[in-house]
Image (tube, helix red, strand yellow):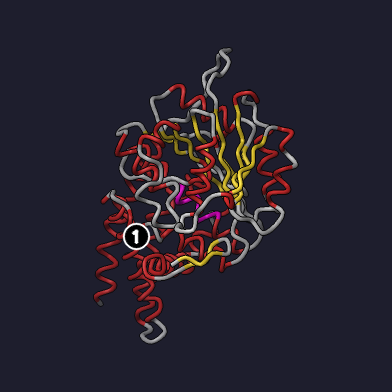
Amino acid sequence: MPFFIAGLILLLAYYILLGFYQYSRKQIPVFHPPHCKTKPVEKISVIIPARNEEKTIANCIQSLLKQNYPGELLEIIVVDDHSTDNTAQIVKQFRGSGVGLISLSEFDLSNTIAFKKMAILAGIQAASGSLIITTDADCTAGTGWISTIAALHTASNAVLIVAPVKIKTNKSLLSIFQSLDFAILQGITAAGVYTNFHRMCNGANLAYEKKAFLAVKGFDDIDDIASGDDMLLMEKIAIKYPGRIAYLNSASAIVETLPAATWKQFFNQRIRWASKSGKYKDKKMFLVLLLVYLLNLCMAILLTGSFFQIQWFGFFLILAFYKCIAEWVFVRDVLKDFKLQFLLPWFPLLQPLHIYYTVISGFLGIFGSYTWKGRKVK
């Protein structure tokens, strides 16, 4: 059985990769901001691109206004990306609190598909802070979020800081699956960034120096793809500033975001993420993605083929069992860090769903199209 043999070979490589991730995560020190009475001096600008976020933008802004960072050193800029709902009107209600609003409709973007990148760019151009922090309009953070990022920036020579993101979960299968899947991705991100093995990040919790953004000419040369405002930018900065990317391992730095509301939205989101995979210059990142994809493809073929050849189901179960064994400790520890231990029993049960979603979203990310925020992208 060629797919089973290929799956075993890929699984062996996967074992080695996960062992490396598990070991690397254990080496990441927890960051504790130094206890000093010195008042912060760095001006920070938080950029929030928003499109049709009337249900979430107020909570996002309120969590930022509760930060324990000095208000005179904190700038909040919301960039409205052609919203057709009441997003802009809600943001205007916070203007008395120092929240700025930029309308992307005032810019000539007739030749772009990278609207989120252009929204962030507009925010950065207007920002007066030396450190830029990006987040999403459906995110909230604890009161120490910005001060923790600022403390690491002061204590290190990092020009870009990757920080953790957590998807909130409820009782729905969709939210459970997303929260579990995303936590695993965050664990891989932490290990990859800390060891400089590969570059991963999420724009919902990303900080970088404005001068570094300008030095790499922002989104130039990566503005031909709708996604990639985070990882493709990170790659440009990492090449320009080798060794100056940091991962922030701190519970106070976690940003929480909402799960996609429907399975259709979820798949479109993941297809959007996968669409940038062909743009990575980092060969290790490409090889990791290829290994994971091919392993899941072999398992998907075996599981699908079992409807026609029942013995294939036995081959699938063998691979699925040992894949779960390989992942178990890593997943358990990651979930513990995010206080999501209650999701662990779901992990083996959701394996078939995870396998098919990986194969389908990966394929459509390269060869298909997706709809995001009401826009269809090829």
Tell me what residue is drawn at x 37 percent, y 51 percent. Answer: 222
Residue 337 visible here: no
Residue 362 percent coordinates (x, y): 39, 65
Using residue 63 as the reference point, say whether residue 353 is left or right of it. left
Quarter of the image for residue 161 reads: top left
Q: Amino acid at mark 1?
A: Val
Residue 271 at x, y = what percent? 45, 63
Tell me the crowding category of disc 1: few under 14, some 14 to 19, or many 20 or more residues within 10 angstroms, Cα based.
Answer: some
The secondary structure that dominates the magenta segment is: helix
In the rendered structure, which segment of residues is drawn in magenta?
Answer: 179-187
- Mark 1 element type: helix
Asked whether 91 or 190 is in front, the reply is 91
Figure check: 70 above or below 185: above
For residue 29, say whether it is visible.
yes
Residue 181 is covered by the magenta coloring: yes
The answer to whether 212 appears left or right of 168 in the picture is left
Quarter of the picture containing the N terminus is bottom left
- The picture quadrant where one finds residue 327 is bottom left
Expressed as whole percent of the image width and height from the top left, the position of residue 303 reads: 40, 76
Is residue 45 positioned above or below 342 on the image?
above
Point out the image quarter for the C terminus.
bottom left
Residue annotated with mark 1 = 292
Task: Please tell me whether residue 73 belongs to the stretch shown in magenta.
Answer: no
Residue drawn at point x = 51 percent, y = 67 percent: 376
